[in-house]
Structures are given as structure tokens and as C-alpha cells.
Image (cartoon, rainbow, N blue to C red):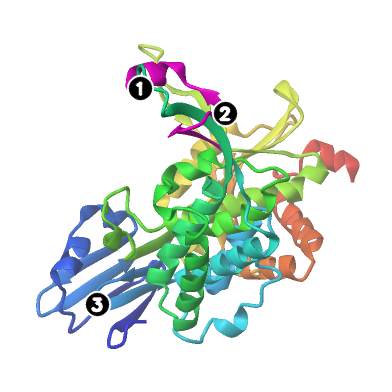
Amino acid sequence: MIPGRRVIEVREYETRVVDAVSLSDRDRCIVENPHLDSRLQLRALDQDRLEIRADCHVGVVALDALEIRVVPKLVGGDLGVLRMVEYVADSTAVRRFDIPRTLDTGGTHLRDLVCLLLARECESVLTAGPRSDYRARNEALPVLRGRLLLDRQLLHRYGRLDQLECRYDERSTDILDNRLCAAALELAARTATAPGIRSRARRLAADFRTLCDPGRVDHRQAAAELHYGRHNEYYRPAHRWALLLLNSGGIRDLFSSGPADERVFLLDMNRLFEDFVTCLTGRALAPLGVTVRAQSRHRGILVHEDTAITHSEVRPDLMLTVGHGPTAWRRPLDVKYKLYADRKLSAPDLYQAFLYSHALSADPRPGTAAECLLVYPGQRETLPRTVAVRTAAGRLTSRITAHALDVPGVLEALVTNREAIALRQLADQLLAPSGPLSQSPPALSTRS
């Protein structure tokens, strides 16, 4: 943390007004930019006040006047966020990393912890030995090396033999694997606020600078270009934290200059929670014969009857399926990262879930109502909540069952090698009957 700069902590979905905030011109460029509103809403008020309205993004925005930290409320703090990232990536780096003692020392926040994990994994890469690979080079040489490029020789050096246009392969450490680590370490060395983490990143950045040119990497395309095998598998954890640090700085390519990128680090918890629930649900239900499909697209649900043109596609977060064809059992599942533990389900979310249940839910057994599941973060002891739709005659037509997922409890089970127990509890929670017309999948009922 910069000496003299105030630190303001705001929780997810919290609104706060801060007094005595003197914004600089650089600060106003960020505060007044409309693209930031989708992540964190900042509004300058009269009498040097600043309104901060947090949404589902967590992280840090470093202004000249103050440092705004949006801390996670629903998943067990910053460590919970990092463990979710690791679980989605199917890694164990955070599970063996002793973070709790460092959370409250030196002003450490989420970005500092990402910098710390990046430095740790990059040190492991250097210990194992940085990778080199063959790269093609074109160069004019006094003697032939590799093969002669006749077209270039005729175009550039016609009639001359003192210089030969050659193409040859040369092993080099200036490759994407190293450049990505180097670029992230350079950013960590500039932006980490904890002195120990910053100095550690600086030392590693200097080491990687001797291996490659960090300015030659496009981190926005790096994820698509990276491919792992037995030669570079040990780079994967370092690349994960490098991409997380590099890709969470800018706002839709708004900040084209370096300094502006370094002032914003915000993670989308809505997306992370959806990915986390997708991984958990898939691993929990696969042994039971339930197929879990993420973001399955369904066209032909909403159709203009006059033109027969599809209005739009219906795409639930998850689709649970047992069997195939008209006799299949199907349940849509919607994931919401919202504070539903202490408030009612919102009408838009209910309408969306009821559409999923009516259009996509299926059960071959007679007398069963359409059903949709909804998962949100909450405490383990929170009981499932059910909202039903009935006709004017009182007939039940559809049901929405909302389940609270205890994210800190699940993460603790994962860290303490109780993953199988946590997955079984989740499976029982999602497939348990929620009412007289709601039953488990036919295959599971037969099996039991």
C-alpha cells in the first residue's frame, strides 16, 4: 500500500459513500468512464464525496486518492476465491499453499495474493529449469547456415556472395512459455503493494528478463496459443496465475496504456461461481449416471407463430439428463451468484427459471410437475426454498427449488481431502425430492 493512501473496503453488492476524497485528473478518467460500471460503479458527488456501488466483481481499484478493495462475502474471503480458481482449473497448488497466516499482514489483498502465487510458481519453473525450443531465424551471414533463401538472396543481394540470406533453427528461451511469465512478473513488480511480494516479483522479473523479451507477448491471445505436453506441463500453474493477473487489469481494452491497466484488478465472481458449480455438479453426478451439460443451446422454444422464426435461443447454465430420447429424465439448473440467503428470489430470476422448467424439464413418469433447480451461495443449514406455479383451479404445473451451496464448507472439504463426501452431499442435495410430485431420476430410483 502506498503510504498516505486510504484503503476503503467494500463488500459485494454493498453501496458506500466516502467523504473527503480529492480525485486527481487520472482518477476522474476512471471514475467517469462508463465501461467501469459493469464491474464497479463509482460516482463523484459534491463536497468531495465518492459513491462506491459494488456488484459481483471483487478485487482492487487503485486511485491516487484512495485504494478501493471489493472483498468477497459469500465464498470465504480472498483465499476462497483462489481455491475456486484452482478447483475449476483442476489443480492442487492452493491446497498445499499455506496462505491463512499471510492474509492479514502487510495490507495483503486479492491481487497481492495472485502476485504471490505467480512468484511462487515461477520460482518452481526456474528451479526445474526454464524451457527452450527451436525457433526459425532469417539472417544474412558470411557463411551458409541452414538453408539458403534464394528468393531473398536475389531480391536483396543480387550478384553478391559476401552475405548469404539463410534460414536456420536455433534453440532459444525467448518463447511464449517464458514470455508470459516474464510479462506477468513485470506487472506484479509494479503493482504489488506488499513490500515483500513486490521485491520477490522484481527479482524474478529480472531473472526472466535474461531469458526472453516480456514485451513480445500478447496476453489476450496467449491462452489460445498455449499448448501443454510433457515438455512444458510444469509451466501450467505459473501460466494460470499469469493470465489471471494480466487479463483482469483492463476493462474491455479501454485502458490501452500501461499505467491505467495497472490500476484495476477485478474478477467476475458470477462467472467464477458458475464455473465452480459446473465442475462440482459434473463430478458429483457423473458416478450416478447423470449427464451434466453446461450452456446447452435450445432453439425453437420461443418462436414467432406468424413467421416461424425463432425469437431467441434458451440456454440454461446446466442441464441434468438421464437417458435419451422421449423417455429421458431432464432437469435444468440455473446458477445465481446473489445474496438470496437473506432475501426473496427476484422476479426476473423466477420468470427465467419457470421458462426453463416449462420448456426443458421432462420426466417420463406420470403425475410429475415440470421443475427447475436454482443454486446460489449460502450457508449449509439453509433449507431449500420452493416456489410453485399453480393454475386458477389449483393444479401444480411447475416448481422452482432453490438450493444454497456452502462454498466455504465445500472448499474446506476439498482442502482436507474430503472431496468425495462433499460431492456426495451435493448430489443428495440436488437430487433429493422437494415435494410430493418431485422425485429423483428414474435410473436412481431403480438403483436405490
Is 136 in the magenta? yes
Q: Amino acid at mark 1?
A: Arg
Q: Earlier in the sequence, mark 2 or mark 3?
A: 3
Name the mark on residue 372.
none
User: What's the distance in space between the residues labelled 2 and 3, CA to CA?
Assistant: 67 Å
Q: Nearer the viewer, residue 443 or 241?
A: 241
Q: Amino acid at mark 3?
A: Val
The residue under the point 33% across, 22% down is 156
Please indicate whether residue 189 sits to the left or right of residue 404 in the image.
Answer: left
Name the mark on residue 157.
1
Q: Position of residue 333 (x, y in %)?
A: 59, 44
Residue located farthest toward the left when viewing the structure as drawn? 46
Magenta highlight range: 135-156
Q: Position of residue 326 (x, y in %)?
A: 71, 22
Picture layout, residue 154 above or below residue 314: above
Q: Which residue is mark 2?
A: 146
Q: Earlier in the sequence, mark 1 or mark 3?
A: 3
The residue under the point 34% across, 55% down is 250
Q: Amino acid at mark 2?
A: Gly
Q: Position of residue 189 (x, y in %)?
A: 42, 70
Q: Secondary structure at mark 2?
A: loop
Q: Earlier in the sequence, mark 1 or mark 2?
A: 2
Q: Secondary structure at mark 1?
A: loop
User: What's the distance in space between the residues labelled 1 and 3, CA to CA?
Assistant: 70 Å
